[in-house]
C-alpha cells in the first residue's frame, strides 16, 4: 500500500459497470428501446464522428501557439459515451486518447455530486493516477448534454511544454518521487456554464515557465471541445438522440465482433517478451526490466506483466500507462481496419498488472516521463508479442511490424530568445524515427511512431523563426535500419547551434535505448541503432560557416565530443553543436537472406554502407560497378554460415520443406520455425529442433553479438551502464539460418518467446 494516506481515492479504475452511485445526482441518457437503424444512416453518422474528431484537431492547430501542437500534432481528440467508453478518436497521439476513459470515469464518480457536472462545464486533469499519461499531457474533459441528460463526452489533450517542477520542460530527471516533480492536478472544473474560472486558471498557469503559452493551449482545447459539443448537437437535432446513441453503441459492438473474429482465426498460445530499460534517474547506471506474457485463448487476449521491476527512480507510470501502451499496439496492429473504439476493445483485452511496479506505480512515485518510458516499454512488449502471434497466420502476418522507435527521446530546451525573453520548448525532430520491417517489405524511413498516425516534425524555417537556433542538418542516417531479409527504415539525426543570442541553453534529455538498442527485430531480424545524444564542445562551426561551408555531419567538425547520458541535464554554449540521432526500425528475417540486388541498391542510396553490406548481409560489391559480385557473395555467405556454427560447415544445405506456415498441418513460430506433430522444425532445411513444450532457443546455436556491430552509431554500453546487457543471435543447427535475435540481461536465460497451444 502507498504510504500517503488517502491517495487510493485517486487510483482510477475502468470498466463498463453502471454508475448507479451517481444516478441520484445526475441523469444519464439511455436508449429508449432499440431504434431501427439503416446502413446508410449508420455510415453517415459514423463518418461524421470521425470528421468531428479531425475538426477538433484542426481547431487546436489554428488556435494553439505551441509548435508542439501546431507543427508536430502532439495532441489528441476523442469522443466517449455517457460513462466514458471511447467510441472514436482522431488520428493523433493514440495513448492520449486511450487514457481519457480513465479520467472521464473518475470525474463522473467523484465530481457529479460536488461540484457537479452541468452543461457548459469542462474539467482539467493532468494527474497520472487518475489517468493522464504524465503531468505534461494535460486533458480537458467536456460533458455533452441533451435535454438535461448526460449524453456523451469530448476530450482533448495537448503536451504542454512546461507545467512547472524542478526541471525545464517538467521532465524531472533527478526526482525520487512526485514531490520532486510538478504536482499533479486531479480533475478540476475550469469552465463552468461556458465561463473560464479565472481563479482555477491562474492556479494552473502560475506553475509554468511559459504561462502565456499554457493559457493559449488551454483556450485551444476549450475551443475544440466546443466544436464537438456543437457538432454532436447538430447530429442529434437532425437524427434524434436515440438514433445517434444507437450508432455509438452499434459501432462499438461491430469493433468488438470484428476483433473477436480475427482472434479466433489465430492460433492459441503464449508469447513472451522482456524489455530492458537503462538508467532510472540522473547518474544511475543500472538496467531494469518489464516482463510481458501475452496469452491468446479463443477470442480473448490477456497481457500479464507479472515480474516487472518495482517502481524505481523517475521512469515510472501509473496504471493508465500500461493500458495506453497495450492499446496503442492493439489499435494499430490488430484493429487498423476497424473503428478505433477503445470502449469495445476493453471487452476483449484484459490485463494483469501488479501494483507497485514501474508500469503501475503507487503514489507518490516519480512519473514525469511516463509518456516516453513506461508507455513505450509496454508498447514494445505488446508489439513484440502481438507480432509473433500474427506470424502464424497466412493473411494477418502481413499486418505485423518489427520494432520501431523504442521511445520518444525527449529533448527539452530552455534559453533566452533574441528579445531576451525566456523560452522553454520540446524539440519535435526526435519523431523522425524509422518504422520496423514487415514480412513483405522494408520499413518506412523516418516514418515516426506507430501510435501517432498524424505525427510530423517541425518545419526547419519555423524552428529557426521561433527560437534562436540555426539548424545545420536534418537527414536520414546510413546503417540505422536494422539488418534483415527486410530492412528496417532509417532513423534521422538533427544538429543545431545557438544563433542570434549569446546566452547558453539548458538541455534536459530523457530516453532509453541509448546504451543498447530497444527496437527489437523479428524472425532473426536485427535491431536498429541506439539513440545518441551528443554535444560537440568548443567546435569550429562558426569559422566553417563564416568561410561559406555548412557542415552536414558531426564528423566534419572539430571539437570535444560529449556523449550525454540517457537521463541528463547539461548546458550548450554558443560554440557548441548539439546533435541527436534517433532510432531506425528493426529488421525482419535473416539478413543473409536479403536479395543481393536489394543490398546493392541500399548501398547506392546510402541506406547501407559497403562495410555493413559485407558484414551483416554477406554481400560483396564490385568496386567498379557497385553491383553485387554474386560468386563472391555466395562465398561470403557460406563463410558466415560456417562462422555461425563455430567453423563447422552446416550439415545440411537449405532444403525447404515445401510447407507454407499457417496451414492446417502446421503453425508458424516465426519466418523459419514451424510446429508440426508437437515438434519445432526448421522450415528452411527440415531440421528437428525440439519438442514444442520446450524453450526452442535452448536447442539452437547461440552466439553473442557486440552492440557496436549492429550500427556504427552504437557505442560501448559500458559508457552508460554497469550491468551487462548482451545481444544473442540464434541459429538453426541444420542450416545456420539466423532464426531469432534478442537483447537480454546476461544473467538470465533466453526468453521462451513463443509457445503454441494448438
Image (cartoon, helix red, strand yellow):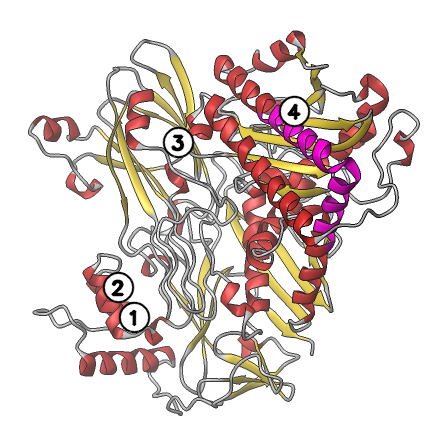
**For marks 3 and 2 on the same chain, the one whose residue lies earlier in the sequence:** 3
**For marks 1 and 4 on the same chain, the one whose residue lies earlier in the sequence:** 4
**Foreground residue, 407 or 256?**
256
Q: Tell me how far mark 1 sits from mark 3, CA to CA.
A: 35 Å
- Per the rendered image, the range of residues in magenta is 224-253
Q: Residue at x 33, y 74 (%)?
A: 592
Q: Tell me how far mark 3 sits from mark 2, CA to CA.
A: 31 Å
Residue contact between numbered discs 2 and 4, judged by CB atoms under 8 Å: no
Where residue 726 sits in the image (x, y, percent)? 45, 60
Q: Tell me how far mark 2 sits from mark 1, CA to CA.
A: 7 Å
In the picture, which quadrant includes the N terminus?
top right
Q: Circle 3: is it few (<14), some (14-19), or many (20+) Cα within 10 Å?
A: some
Q: Tell me how far mark 2 sits from mark 4, CA to CA.
A: 48 Å
Residue named by callout 2: 612
Residue named by callout 4: 184
**For marks 2 and 4 on the same chain, the one whose residue lies earlier in the sequence:** 4
Q: Circle 1: is it few (<14), some (14-19), or many (20+) Cα within 10 Å?
A: many
Residue named by callout 1: 617
Q: Is residue 362 visible?
A: no
Judge whether residue 688 is colored magenta: no
Q: Secondary structure at mark 3?
A: loop
Q: Tell me how far mark 4 sits from mark 3, CA to CA.
A: 23 Å
Residue named by callout 3: 427
Amino acid at each position: 500500500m502507498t504510504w500517503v494516506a488517502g491517495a487510493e481515492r485517486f487510483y482510477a479504475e475502468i470498466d463498463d459497470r453502471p454508475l448507479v452511485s451517481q444516478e441520484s445526482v445526475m441523469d444519464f441518457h439511455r436508449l429508449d428501446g432499440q431504434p431501427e437503424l439503416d446502413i446508410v444512416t449508420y455510415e453517415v453518422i459514423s463518418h461524421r464522428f470521425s470528421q468531428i474528431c479531425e475538426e477538433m484537431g484542426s481547431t487546436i492547430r489554428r488556435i494553439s501557439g505551441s509548435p508542439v501542437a501546431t507543427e508536430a500534432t502532439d495532441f489528441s481528440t476523442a469522443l466517449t459515451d455517457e460513462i466514458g467508453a471511447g467510441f472514436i478518436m482522431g488520428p493523433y497521439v493514440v495513448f492520449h486518447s486511450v487514457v481519457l476513459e480513465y479520467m472521464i470515469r473518475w470525474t463522473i464518480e467523484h465530481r457529479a455530486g460536488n461540484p457537479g457536472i452541468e452543461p457548459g462545464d469542462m474539467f482539467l486533469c493532468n494527474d497520472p493516477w487518475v489517468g493522464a499519461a504524465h503531468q505534461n499531457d494535460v486533458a480537458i474533459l467536456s460533458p455533452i448534454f441533451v435535454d438535461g441528460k448526460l449524453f456523451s463526452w469530448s476530450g482533448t489533450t495537448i503536451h504542454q511544454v512546461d507545467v512547472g517542477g524542478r526541471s525545464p520542460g517538467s521532465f524531472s530527471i533527478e526526482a525520487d518521487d512526485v514531490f520532486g516533480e510538478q504536482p499533479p492536478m486531479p480533475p478540476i472544473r475550469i469552465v463552468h456554464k461556458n465561463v473560464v474560472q479565472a481563479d482555477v486558471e491562474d492556479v494552473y498557469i502560475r506553475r509554468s515557465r511559459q504561462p502565456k503559452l499554457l493559457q493559449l493551449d488551454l483556450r485551444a482545447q476549450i475551443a475544440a471541445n466546443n466544436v464537438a459539443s456543437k457538432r454532436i448537437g447538430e447530429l442529434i437535432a437532425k437524427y434524434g438522440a436515440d438514433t445517434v446513441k444507437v450508432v455509438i453503441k452499434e459501432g462499438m459492438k461491430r469493433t468488438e465482433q470484428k476483433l473477436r473474429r480475427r482472434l479466433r482465426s489465430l492460433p492459441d498460445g503464449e508469447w513472451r517478451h522482456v524489455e530492458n530499460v537503462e538508467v532510472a534517474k540522473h547518474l544511475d547506471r543500472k538496467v531494469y526490466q518489464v516482463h510481458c506474457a501475452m496469452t491468446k485463448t479463443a477470442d480473448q487476449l490477456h497481457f500479464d506483466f507479472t515480474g516487472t521491476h518495482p517502481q524505481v527512480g523517475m521512469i515510472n507510470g501509473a496504471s493508465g500507462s500500461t493500458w495506453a501502451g497495450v492499446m496503442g499496439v492493439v489499435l494499430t496492429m490488430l484493429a487498423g481496419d476497424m473503428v478505433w473504439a477503445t470502449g469495445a476493445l476493453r471487452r476483449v483485452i484484459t490485463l494483469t498488472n501488479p501494483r507497485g511496479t514501474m508500469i503501475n506505480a503507487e503514489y507518490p512515485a516519480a512519473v514525469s516521463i511516463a509518456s516516453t518510458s513506461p508507455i513505450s516499454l509496454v508498447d514494445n512488449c505488446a508489439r513484440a508479442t502481438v507480432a509473433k502471434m500474427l506470424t502464424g497466420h497466412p493473411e494477418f502476418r502481413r499486418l505485423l511490424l518489427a520494432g520501431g522507435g523504442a521511445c520518444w527521446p525527449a529533448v527539452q530546451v530552455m534559453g533566452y530568445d533574441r528579445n531576451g525573453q525566456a523560452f522553454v520548448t520540446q524539440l519535435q525532430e526526435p519523431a523522425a524515427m524509422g518504422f520496423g520491417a514487415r514480412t513483405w517489405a522494408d520499413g518506412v524511413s523516418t516514418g515516426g511512431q506507430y501510435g501517432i498516425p498524424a505525427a510530423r516534425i517541425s518545419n526547419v524555417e519555423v524552428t529557426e523563426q521561433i527560437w534562436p537556433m540555426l539548424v545545420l542538418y536534418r537527414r536520414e542516417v546510413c546503417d540505422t535500419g536494422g539488418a534483415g531479409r527486410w530492412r528496417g527504415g532509417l532513423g534521422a539525426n538533427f544538429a543545431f547551434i545557438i544563433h542570434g543570442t549569446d546566452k547558453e541553453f539548458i538541455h534536459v534529455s530523457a530516453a532509453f535505448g541509448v546504451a543498447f538498442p530497444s527496437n527489437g527485430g523479428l524472425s532473426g531480424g536485427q535491431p536498429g541503432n541506439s539513440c545518441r545524444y551528443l554535444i560537440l564542445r568548443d567546435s569550429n562551426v562558426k569559422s566553417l560557416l563564416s568561410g561559406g561551408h555548412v557542415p552536414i555531419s558531426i564528423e566534419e567538425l572539430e571539437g570535444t565530443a560529449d556523449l550525454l547520458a540517457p537521463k541528463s541535464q547539461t548546458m550548450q554554449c554558443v560554440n557548441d553543436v548539439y546533435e541527436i540521432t534517433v532510432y531506425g526500425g528493426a529488421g525482419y528475417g535473416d539478413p543473409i537472406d536479403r536479395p543481393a540486388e536489394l543490398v546493392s541498391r541500399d548501398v547506392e542510396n546510402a541506406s547501407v554502407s559497403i562495410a555493413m553490406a559485407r558484414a551483416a548481409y554477406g554481400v560483396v560489391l564490385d568496386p567498379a560497378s557497385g553491383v553485387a559480385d554474386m560468386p563472391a557473395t555466395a562465398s561470403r555467405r557460406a563463410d558466415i554460415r560456417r562462422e555461425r556454427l563455430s567453423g563447422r560447415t552446416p550439415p545440411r544445405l537449405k532444403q525447404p520443406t515445401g510447407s507454407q506456415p499457417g496451414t492446417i498441418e502446421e503453425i508458424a513460430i516465426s519466418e523459419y520455425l514451424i510446429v508440426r506433430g508437437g515438434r519445432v522444425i526448421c522450415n528452411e532445411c527440415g531440421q528437428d529442433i525440439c519438442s514444442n513444450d520446450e524453450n526452442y532457443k535452448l536447442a539452437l546455436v547461440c552466439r553473442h553479438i557486440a552492440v557496436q556491430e549492429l550500427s556504427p552509431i552504437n557505442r560501448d554500453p559500458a559508457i552508460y551502464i554497469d550491468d551487462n546487457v548482451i545481444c544473442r543471435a540464434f541459429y538453426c543447427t541444420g542450416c545456420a539460418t539466423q532464426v531469432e535475435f534478442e537483447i537480454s540481461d546476461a544473467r538470465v536465460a533466453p526468453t521462451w518467446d513463443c509457445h503454441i497451444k494448438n
